Amino acid sequence: MKTIDDLPLWQDKKAHQVLDELSSKHQVPTDVLKELVAIEKQHQHRERARGIYDDFDNAFEQMD
């Protein structure tokens, strides 16, 4: 997984608890959500996010 540990969400225990609750409620594993955030972070400075949808698809395949 790409690194996202520097983002405030992953360091704030209360925010992380809310994230876990929402992930559970919507049946999206927290690991998949973390991977999606990491993918977005990886592509955020690119002029064109070429390949981001393929990366998203690969992350969603973990849910199957």
Image (spheres, grey):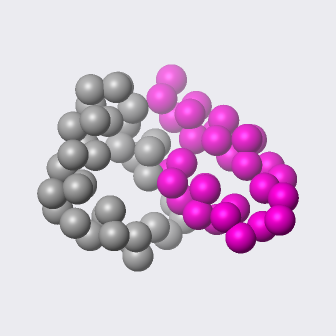
Q: Is residue 34 above or below residue 47?
A: above
The reply to whether the magenta stretch includes residue 37 is yes
Judged left or right of residue 29, residue 45 is: right
Judged left or right of residue 24, residue 61 is: right
Judged left or right of residue 23, residue 62 is: right
Q: Is residue 45 above or below residue 35?
A: below
Secondary structure predominantly adopted by residues drawn in magenta: helix
Q: Position of residue 45 (x, y in %)?
A: 71, 70
Q: Position of residue 39 (x, y in %)?
A: 61, 56
Q: Quadrant of residue 8?
A: bottom left
Judged left or right of residue 17, residue 54 is: right
Residue lying at 35% horizontally and 43% vertically, measured from the top left:
30
Q: Nearer the viewer, residue 12 or 27?
A: 12
**Residues in magenta, as a range:** 35-64
Q: Position of residue 47 (x, y in %)?
A: 83, 65
Q: Nearer the viewer, residue 36 or 46?
A: 46
Residue lying at 51% horizontally and 23% vertically, measured from the top left:
64
Residue lying at 78% horizontally and 56% vertically, measured from the top left:
49
Q: Position of residue 31 (x, y in %)?
A: 40, 46
The reply to whether the magenta stretch includes residue 52 is yes
Residue at the extreme front: 47
Residue lying at 44% horizontally and 45% vertically, measured from the top left:
33
